């Protein structure tokens, strides 16, 4: 994941400065905090928040405890971590009450991903055994309803097709449909609107006044700049938001809008959209995200993803193969598939504590994984089990068969060797703590 | 409060917080910290009594450093629209179609976004409304083949302007970026030259990530201009000033409302006035 990456890197520079100082003078604190301030501003964090966070960190950094500490840099990082976590608050789930009608309304600007998110949310609930009805509620954008219906049908989700031309009668009709069919949750995909569009905001407040909503979620694009504050504020003046969903968590967004949302609206971020697939919606855990931003990694999420992608049995059998030295290209391919399921190398590396000098953007994993798969598929069984037999003529054959160059095959074989070496090194590491100490 | 008012107030007060207030204004309008700090340095060195005028001139100079006119050479004129998801490509295409239709031009649309659910339906509805032809295939088909078909049909029908939609893509998706390069090659092959304009559609609300978007999209395709959408919202699109300064890519159109006629050729005065 590349989101927050530039913020993370810029903060690392500030931390490095602090670490290089040993004991901190007034001037050092000032200089380091200036870097932190610039890093936050560069990441689109709201101006007022930056001012406040920097002020609070500064106050605490000047305390005796930090100044007299042997590791003042680590103290400051902890202070910053705590301040940022305080701004984002705790994770908060949806307000779904069993055996009641729960209306979840998605609101926001045009083009921020409401329709896609609505479908993802229905799918997320379905995976939890909760049936949710998708209600197309955008009476403005051409083919908005078709988009939601298409997404619903493709993913076997319930969708209300019998919409009328007006919001209030449509929702009334949908409610009676829910009652008739025993559906207790609805996700309402409203039209995109600007918070300064009086007519459209009036329509929204009208709907809001006439029905009871369990959640009103503000859907926002993670790449939003400083204006995010104004928009979210504008919406929260018309309806009581219960939270936010941030899309494009898979972009290289600076993420300032995410860090600013709760401060401005007082409401938590509940989910983030992490890709284009229907499954790409994740619960938002503020502490994990902040942990990653300050360079401490996010091992909790990584462990969760790993356990989903690779079963315990698989990892045990892998360990055995490494010990017996029978780890071959078939295993390598399986490992790569696991990595792919976890979101690729870049995603994994970004979840680990910061490693100085490692450039994530240089890792073009999607393509490399694809190529590697193609090459291994083009090999014979024997070649996969004993890569050392792959000579020049075999390389030529494989290259022809899988549409790659000989150089690509050399790269793969080298990667395989490195990976194997790495795995051998890993078996000597007893615990995750040891890996952490390596940094 | 507009920048003018704000600055006037600042000047009257003549307090130490002047620099802070200017900084706040620039940051809140997405000029970015790098541009902001540089400007504040210049301002200090210059010791001008008219910081508003100084900023205005600075912005004007940057906007004047690029040519915002459309390249309409050759026949047919071909525009390719690219950008991230939700920036407003499809809507902008309809507006540009309307813009050319009003000049009596024969326009054809190509539904190159075969990925997003109902993107083709959305463009088709807009095409029907405008009464312009559209070339499309099924959802999920290869965009390069749609573009190929579309251009062939455009050449046959001798249309004047071809507008090509493409699927929104986040700048971190390398394979989707390569797909765009392929579309560009198909266009070159089919009409024997590059597209007249490759327009990056950029949402005015975008923060500093806009710089990455420009960086990555210009690597994949030869971006000739920007369509700055949603300028009628509460965001002023200040981010384009540092972008133009760095990449020398002009803004060619601005989206100023939701009506079909609400797309204008870039207008420096309009832009600066809404900004300040």
Image (cartoon, rainbow, N blue to C red):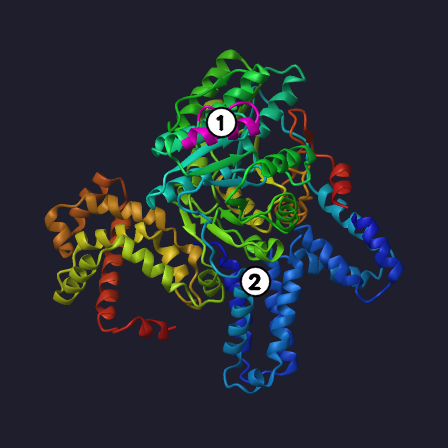
Q: Estimate the spatial distance between the alpha carbons at disc 1 and disc 2, rounded to whole Å.
A: 40 Å
Q: Is residue A365 left or right of residue A92?
A: left
In the rendered image, is residue B53 in sight? Answer: no
Give the secondary structure at mark 1.
helix
Q: Main secondary structure of the magenta part?
A: helix
Q: Is residue A391 above or below residue B167?
A: below
Q: Which residue is mark 2?
A: A87
Q: Nearer the viewer, residue A165 or B26?
A: A165
Q: Nearer the N terminus, badge 1 or badge 2?
A: 2
Residue A147 location, x and y as percent?
Answer: 45, 29
Q: Nearer the viewer, residue A228 or A125?
A: A125
Q: Is residue B149 magenta?
A: no
What label sits on residue A323 in the rendered view? Answer: none
Q: Quadrant of residue B104?
A: top right
State the image quarter where residue B33 is shown: bottom right
User: What is the quadrant of residue B182 in the picture?
Assistant: top left
Residue furthest out toward the bottom: A68
Which chain does the residue under circle 2 lie in? A
The span shown in magenta is A161-179
Query: Please, what secondary structure does the residue beneath circle 2 have?
Result: helix
Q: Residues within 10 Å of mark 1 (few under 14, many from 20)?
A: some
Q: Is residue A177 magenta?
A: yes
Crowd tier of the residue under label 2, counting other residues whose Cα lies within 10 Å: few below 14, some 14–19, many 20 or above: many
- Residue A78: give x, y in percent of width and height: 51, 73
Chain for mark 1? Answer: A
Q: Is residue A382 above or below residue A428?
A: above
The residue tagged 1 is A173
Residue at image coords 62%, 64% = A38
x and y, in percent, of residue A234 in the image: 66, 45
């Amino acid at each position: 994941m590349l989101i927050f990456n530039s913020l993370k890197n810029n903060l690392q520079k500030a931390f490095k400065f602090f670490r290089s100082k040993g004991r901190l003078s007034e001037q050092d604190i000032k200089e380091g905090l200036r870097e932190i301030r610039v890093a936050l501003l560069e990441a689109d964090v709201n101006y007022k928040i930056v001012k406040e966070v920097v002020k609070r960190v500064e106050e605490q950094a000047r305390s005796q405890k930090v100044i007299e500490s042997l590791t003042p840099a680590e103290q400051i990082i902890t202070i910053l971590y705590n301040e940022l976590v305080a701004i984002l608050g705790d994770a908060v789930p949806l307000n779904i009450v069993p055996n009641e009608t729960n209306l979840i309304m998605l609101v926001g600007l045009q083009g921020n991903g409401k329709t896609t998110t609505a479908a993802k949310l229905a799918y997320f609930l379905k995976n939890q055994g909760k049936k949710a009805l998708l209600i197309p509620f955008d009476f403005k954008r051409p083919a908005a309803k078709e988009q939601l219906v298409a997404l619903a049908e493709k993913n076997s989700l319930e969708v209300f097709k019998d919409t009328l031309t007006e919001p209030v009668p449509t929702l009334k009709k949908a409610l009676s449909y829910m009652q008739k069919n025993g559906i207790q949750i609805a996700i309402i995909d409203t039209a995109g609107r600007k918070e300064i569009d009086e007519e459209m905001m009036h329509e929204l407040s009208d709907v809001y006044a006439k029905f009871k909503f369990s959640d009103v979620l503000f859907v926002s694009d993670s790449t939003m700049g400083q204006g995010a504050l104004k928009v979210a504020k504008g919406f929260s003046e018309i309806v009581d938001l219960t939270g936010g969903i941030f899309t494009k968590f898979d972009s290289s967004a600076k993420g300032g809008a995410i860090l600013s949302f709760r401060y401005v609206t007082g409401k938590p971020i509940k989910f983030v959209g992490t890709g284009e697939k229907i499954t790409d919606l994740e619960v938002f855990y503020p502490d994990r995200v902040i942990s990653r931003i300050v360079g401490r990694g996010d091992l909790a999420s990584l462990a969760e993803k790993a356990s989903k992608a690779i079963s315990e049995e698989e990892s045990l059998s892998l360990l055995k193969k490494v010990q017996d030295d029978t780890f071959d290209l078939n295993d390598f391919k399986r490992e790569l598939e696991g990595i792919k399921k976890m979101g690729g190398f870049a995603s994994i590396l970004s979840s680990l504590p910061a490693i100085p000098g490692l450039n994530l953007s240089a890792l073009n994993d999607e393509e490399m994984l694809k190529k590697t798969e193609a090459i291994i598929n083009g090999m014979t069984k024997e070649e996969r089990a004993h890569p050392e037999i792959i000579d020049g003529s075999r390389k030529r054959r494989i290259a022809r068969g899988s549409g790659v160059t000989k150089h690509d095959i050399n790269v793969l074989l080298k990667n395989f060797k490195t990976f194997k070496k790495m795995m051998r090194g890993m078996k000597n590491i007893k615990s995750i703590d040891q890996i952490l100490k390596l940094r | 409060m507009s920048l003018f008012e704000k600055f006037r107030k600042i000047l009257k007060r003549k307090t130490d917080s002047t620099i802070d207030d200017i900084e706040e204004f620039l940051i809140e309008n997405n000029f970015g910290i790098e541009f902001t700090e540089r400007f504040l340095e210049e301002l200090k060195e210059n010791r001008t009594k008219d910081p508003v005028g100084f900023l205005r001139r600075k912005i004007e100079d940057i906007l004047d450093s690029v040519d915002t006119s459309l390249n309409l050479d050759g026949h047919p004129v071909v525009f390719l629209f690219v950008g991230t998801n939700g920036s407003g490509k499809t809507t902008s295409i309809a507006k540009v179609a309307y813009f050319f239709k009003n000049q009596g031009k024969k326009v054809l649309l190509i539904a190159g976004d075969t990925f997003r659910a109902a993107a083709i339906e959305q463009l088709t509805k807009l095409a029907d409304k405008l009464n312009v032809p559209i070339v499309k295939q099924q959802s999920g088909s290869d965009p390069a083949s749609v573009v190929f078909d579309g251009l062939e049909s455009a050449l046959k029908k001798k249309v004047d302007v071809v507008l090509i939609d493409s699927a929104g893509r986040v700048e971190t998706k390398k394979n989707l970026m390569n797909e765009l390069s392929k579309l560009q090659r198909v266009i070159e092959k089919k009409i024997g030259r590059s597209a007249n304009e490759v327009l990056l559609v950029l949402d005015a609300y975008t923060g500093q990530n806009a710089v990455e978007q420009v960086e990555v999209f210009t690597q994949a395709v030869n971006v000739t201009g920007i369509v700055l959408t949603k300028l009628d919202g509460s965001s002023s699109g200040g981010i384009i000033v540092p972008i133009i300064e760095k990449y020398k890519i002009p803004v060619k159109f601005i989206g100023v409302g939701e009506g079909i006629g609400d797309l204008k050729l870039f207008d420096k005065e309009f832009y600066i006035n809404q900004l300040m």
